[in-house]
Image (cartoon, rainbow, N blue to C red):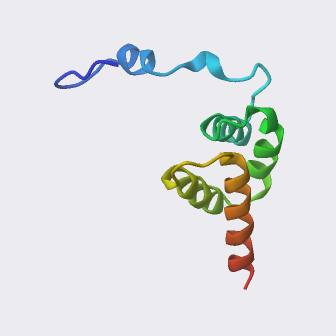
Amino acid sequence: MKKTKGLQSIQQILAGYNLGDKGKYITREFQDYGYRLAQELKDEKHKSLYIKLAKEIDRKLLEEAKIFVKDAREVKSKGRLFMWKLAELRRNSAK
């Protein structure tokens, strides 16, 4: 998307989003969040797991785990690191 000075039209803003990359049966916000989380972690094979987590777990914990993974370097499996960090955060929040 090109950066322009001043205000942008809605058409210009929406042109920067890839709206066709969602699954064809996504109708709820938590489904969209879970699907996009799977894409960010490059773990689309387990997208149903991320959708379930987005439905049942506090979004704050999911965001913290996602940020932790994004900051990590040279990770073999982002999905595995995400699940480890999420489990750690859930244990700490239960105390």
Residue 14: percent from left, percent from top: 44, 19
When the figure is inspected, residue 32 is found, relative to residue 18, above or below; the finding is below
Residue 91: percent from left, percent from top: 74, 76
Q: 3 and 10: which one is in front?
A: 3
When the figure is inspected, residue 43 is found, relative to residue 16, above or below; the finding is below
Q: Quadrant of residue 22?
A: top right
Q: Residue at x 60, y 38 (%)?
A: 40
Judged from this view, the residue extending furthest toward the left is 5
Along the horizontal axis of the image, is 39 left or right of 13? right
Along the horizontal axis of the image, is 77 left or right of 63? right
Q: Residue at x 70, y 71 (%)?
A: 88
Q: Quadrant of residue 85?
A: bottom right
Figure disc tally: 0
Q: Quadrant of residue 93?
A: bottom right
Along the horizontal axis of the image, is 7 left or right of 71? left
Q: Residue at x 68, y 55 (%)?
A: 81
Q: Residue at x 81, y 38 (%)?
A: 46
Quadrant that contains the C terminus: bottom right
Residue 77: percent from left, percent from top: 69, 46
